[in-house]
Amino acid sequence: MTVVAATLLWGCGTTRHVPDGSRLLDKVDITVEDSSGVKTAELYNYLRQTPNHKVLGFAKLQLGIYNLSGNDSTSRFNRWLRKIGQPPVIFDSELTDQSARQLRLALVNKGYDRAEVEVDTIPSGNKKMRVRYRLTPGEAFTVNRISYEFEDSALRRLVMADSALFPIAPGDNLDRTVLDNQRTFITERLRNHGYYAFTKEYISFTADTTAGSRGVDLLMTVSDPRPTNAAQPDTTAAGPQRHTRYIFRNVYVVTDFSPGDNAGAYSFEARDTTTYNGLRILYGKDRYLRPGTISEQCYVLPGHPYSTAAIDRTYEAMNRLAILRYVNILTRPAGREGDNETLDAFILLSRTKKQGVSVELEGTNSEGDLGVGGGLTYTNRNLTHRGEVLTAKIRGAYESLSGNLDGLINDRYTEVAAEVGITFPKFEAPFLSQKFKRRMRASTEFAVTFMRQERPEYTRVIAGAAWKYKWADRLNMTRRTFDLVDINLVNLPRSTEDFINNIAPDNPLLRYSYEDHLIMRMGYTWYHTNRRPASTGTERHHRQVNTYTVRASGEIAGNLLYAISKLANIRKSDGVYKVLGIQYAQYIKGEIDYTINHAFTSRNSLSFHAGFGIGYPYGNSRMIPFEKRFYAGGANGVRGWSVRTLGPGAYDARNSVTDFINQCGDISLILNLEYRNKLFWVFEGAVFIDAGNIWTIRSYPNQPGGLFRFRNFAKEIAAAYGIGLRMDFTYFLLRFDLGFKAHNPAMNQEPWPIIHPNWHRDATFHFSVGYPF
C-alpha cells in the first residue's frame, strides 16, 4: 500500500495540475509559543484550508491518483481518476487570514482573551507553500466562584438539585463553549419537568473581572419571561411573569395516520374510539395493535408534566415495533387549567405489511453429482396484535451419489432444517414489576431448531431450544443478554458399522462431534461502550477522541441435570450420567473482551483489543464440548494463521483433513493493535500486529504440547503482522487482510518466520465483513 502511494506521488509529480502563478499548499503547522496547555490537535478543526490528505502521514495518495489524470476532460478514465482522487489544494491567502482569525476566536472562547496569532508563509520547492500558525494564548481567565440568581424560586429548587452535574466549576477556564453546554443542560432538565416553553435564552452569564489576577466571579442568571409588546401589562405594576409548567391534557394515538398529512392529525379529536389508561386510541378501520400494547410503549401520559425525555422514549419504544413504519408525535397548546398550561399530544402511527415471505434456491455440481437446495422464510411482524415477530425458516438440500455405494446406509446427501422463533418487544416475565419493565428497552426471545442430515455413512439429528431475555439502556450503550435456558441435542439414529471407530479411533474430540450428546446451559452477557450513538449528533469539533467497549460473558451447563441425577439415584452408564441414554455436558465458561480506539484525526485512528477466555469441564464431563471450546487464528484472531490452524500451545498440526478438530482449547488469549487510515472514496488502509494462542486445561493425548504451563507461557505466544484494505459502504464494511507469521510456537516448525520468511508458508489472506474489533 505504501509502495503504491509513493509511486503515485513521486512518479507523477505533486504539482502537475497546479496552475502557473499558484502554489500547492504543501504543509500546515500550528505551534503554541507558551506552556498554556492548549491542545494543538483540537485547533486544526478551525482551519479554513488544509493540505491534501496524507496516507500514513507522508504519502498524498489521493493527490497522486488525481495527478494520473490527463487534461482531456472527455476521457472517462480521466474523469474516474479525478472522481476518486483529490485535486491539489491551492494556497489561498484570504483563507489563510480567515484561519488565523478563527484560531484567535477559538482561543478567546476558551478564556484566552489576550491571544495572538501570527502567520508565516514559506515558499518551498516547485510551486509549493508551507504555512505556520504561531499562537501565543497568554494567561486565561479562570473561574474563582460561581453565583446563581433565579427570579423564580421554583426553578431554583429544580435546577440546583443537579448542581453537582454542572459542566462549569470553580478553577475551570472561562470557556464559552462550556458555559453554553451548561445552558443546554439546565434547559433540558427544565423541559423534562414540564417547562415546555423554556429556552436557553433565559439563561445568561455575567463575568466580574474586577477581582484581578485573571480570576473571574461568575454570575448565572435565570430570568423570567418579559412582555413582548406594549399591549401587555407592565411587569412592575402587575407583578412579574413566571415560567409556567405544561401538563398533558389529552393524549391521542392515531393508528392509521397517513404520513405527510400532519394537518389532518387534529381532525380525529371527535372520534374517541377507545380509552385505555387515559390514552384516547383512534384505530380507524383495523385494530392491529392491542390497547395494552400501545399503552406499554407510550411514556407521554395524560396528567403528567411535559417531558422531552418522555417524548423521546415514546419514539424509541414505538419504533421497536416491527409492524410500524412511521411514528410522529405532535403537541398543541390546549389552554390554561389552574396554575398550569395544558397540551394535547398526538401520537401518529402508520403500519407496514404484516407478513413477508422470501425464497432462495441454489444448485450444486460436485464431481458430476448434481444437487439442489432451497429455503423459505416466513415473517409475521404482529402475530397476536402485541407487536411480537414470528420468524419461520425451512431449508432443504439434496445431492444424488453415483459410484460404489456398498456398505453405505444412504445413497444421497440430504439435509432438512427448520427454525421457528418468536420475539416479544418486552420482558415476558410475570415476576418483574411493570415499573421495571417500562424502564428498560427489552425483548424476550423463544426459538426451536431442528436439522436432519443424511450422509452415506450416517444419519444425524441436531435439535435445540432457547429462551432468552435482552435489555438495554435508553442510548443502547449498555446491553445485557440472559440465556435462561439453551438446549442443544445431537443424535445419530443410524450409522454404518464401525463408522465412529474408523474415523477417529484415538481422537475423543472428533468422536464427540459424531456421538450423541446433550448441552443444557444458562448464560449471561454484559456489554458496555462509551461510544455515543449517531443520533446524539456530535459535531466535528466535539469528536470523541477515545472510545471503548467492554464485553463480559459467562455460562454454566449441566448442573441442574447433574443434581436431578444425584437426587434420583440414577446409575451411571459407562462412567457418566445420561438422560434418555444420552450423555450431557457439564462445564463452566467465561470470557472478557476490551477494545479502545484513539482517533488522532477524523481520518486516522489506533485501536487496541484484548480478549481472554477460560472454560473448565467437571462433574459429568472430562472435556468441554467441541463447539464450546476456543480456537485461534482467522480474520478476527491472530491473522498470520487461518481459522483453527493455531495452537493449542506448542501443538504441531499434522495437516490431515480432520486435524482442525484438535486445534481448540480451554484457555484463550488474544491481543491486537491496528492503525487505520482513510484513503480515498470508500477505501481505508490498515497495518496491524496480533498476538495470542489457546491452551488446554488438561493434558489430552491427541493434543501434545497443548497443556497450559506458566513456564512455557511466553514462548507459546504466537505473533503476526500484516496490512489490510477495507471498503466502507456506510451500512456494511468489506475487509481484506493479509497477515504474516512473525513468531510460530508450534513444535518442529520455524519459530521466527519474521527472520526467515517464506511467502507460501507464512502468508494468510482473510476476507470478512466488519472490523475485527
Image: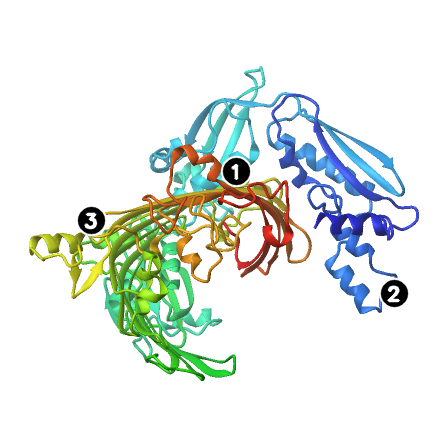
Q: Quadrant of residue 729?
A: bottom right
Indicate whether 385 appears above or below 655: below
Disc 2 to disc 3, how far (Cα)? 77 Å
Indicate whether 273 appears above or below 576: below
Contact? badges 2 and 1 (CB < 8 Å): no
Residue position for label 2: 72
Question: In the image, 161: left or right of 561?
Answer: right
Name the foreground residue: 362 vs 162.
362
Q: Position of residue 699 (x, y in %)?
A: 33, 44
Question: In the image, 100: left or right of 441?
Answer: right
Query: Which of the two labelled residues, at mark 2 and mark 1, occupies the earlier sequence position?
Result: 2
Question: In the image, 236: left or right of 121?
Answer: left
Q: Which mark is residue 180?
A: 1
Q: Secondary structure at mark 2?
A: loop
Q: Position of residue 721 (x, y in %)?
A: 59, 45
Q: Which kind of residue does numbered mark 1 sit on?
A: Asp
Q: Tally the marks.
A: 3
Query: Which of the two labelled residues, at mark 1 and mark 3, occupies the earlier sequence position?
Result: 1
Q: Which kind of residue does numbered mark 3 sit on?
A: Gly
Q: Which mark is residue 619?
A: 3
Question: Residue at left 17%, top 54%?
Answer: 575
Contact? badges 2 and 3 (CB < 8 Å): no
- Can you tell which of label 1 and label 3 is closer to the viewer? 3
Q: Secondary structure at mark 3?
A: loop
